[in-house]
Image (cartoon, rainbow, N blue to C red):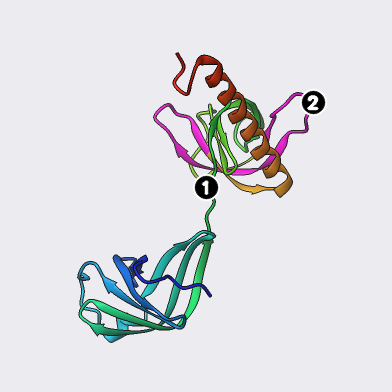
Amino acid sequence: MTLPSPSDAVTIVGPRGERIPARVVDSDGDSVDVALMFRPARPLRQDLLKQLTMEFTLPRGRVRLQGDVQLEDRDLLHFADLRPVELRQEREYVRVPSSRPVTISIDHGPGKVLTYSVDLSGGGILLAGPSTLQIGERIPFELTTDKGEAPIRGVGVVVRVDSESRRAIRFERISEVDRRRLVRFIFECMRVERQRQLLRGGPGGS
């Protein structure tokens, strides 16, 4: 199990979700000493110490650890016998503007609806519509990238509506093959745009 290193920033999460910024003072592979950056709103009683969680970020995602916690000083915590309670994989994707046909299936209304993407990433799509989609709604989709190519299929969830009533869809289920196809298409869009910029005389054009 990978532990944070000395001077790494971590967050101490309390039983009610309160979050205290902290920094690692010492880490020896089995235990971690953490200095709190701010005093907690409530005194850290022994029964509360057992419920504290240490949260930090690794390249593969966000990690939460719990263990035996001792208050060494007013602002110094000693974590030992650590065990993971959560590893949340977090991916970041390049997003590119791209208007492509997207067919979505919705339970209310006509069933299948044709709309268009505004931008694309390996993790989701920003759709031009329809305005009937609600936050939290799950929708099967088919994204057409190139003529003659099979559409990229999956299921997404509406996570945001922007000021122009466009719907942000986060992929919830998509095959790894289709995700790789989408990423290749995105990088091809970036390559084409870069060539256009060079022809115009630079990143800002001329």
Separation (CA) of disc 1 from disc 2: 29 Å
Q: Specify the label residue 92 is tagged with.
A: 1
| Above or below: residue 13 compared with residue 97 | below
| Residue 74 image offset from top left, x and y in percent | 20, 80
Q: Is residue 135 left or right of residue 78?
A: right
Q: Is residue 20 magenta?
A: no
Task: Give the quadrant of the C terminus.
Answer: top left
Q: Can you tell which of label 1 and label 2 is closer to the viewer?
A: 1
Q: Amino acid at mark 2?
A: Gly
Task: Judge by depth and name the residue closer to the eye, 109 or 115.
Answer: 115
| Residue 182 image offset from top left, x and y in percent | 66, 38
Packing grade of label 2 (10 A; few <14, some 14-19, many >=20) is few
Part of the protein shown in magenta: 141-168
Task: Judge by depth and name the residue closer to the eye, 194 or 51.
Answer: 194
| Residue 195 image offset from top left, x and y in percent | 59, 22
State the SS at label 1.
loop
| Residue 64 image offset from top left, x and y in percent | 45, 69
| Above or below: residue 66 compared with residue 187 | below
| Above or below: residue 149 compared with residue 182 | above
Q: Amino acid at mark 1?
A: Glu
Packing grade of label 1 (10 A; few <14, some 14-19, many >=20) is few
Task: Judge by depth and name the residue closer to the eye, 192 or 20.
Answer: 192
The residue singled out by tag 2 in the image is: 148
At x 48%, y 21%, the residue is 202
Q: Is residue 62 left or right of residue 68?
A: right
Asked where in the image residue 10 lies, by quadrant, the reply is bottom left
Task: Judge by depth and name the residue closer to the eye, 103 or 205.
Answer: 205
User: Going from the N terminus, do you reach mark 1 or mark 2 first?
Assistant: 1
State the SS at label 2.
loop
| Above or below: residue 98 compared with residue 89 | above
At x 39%, y 29%, the residue is 163
Q: Specify the label residue 203 is tagged with.
A: none
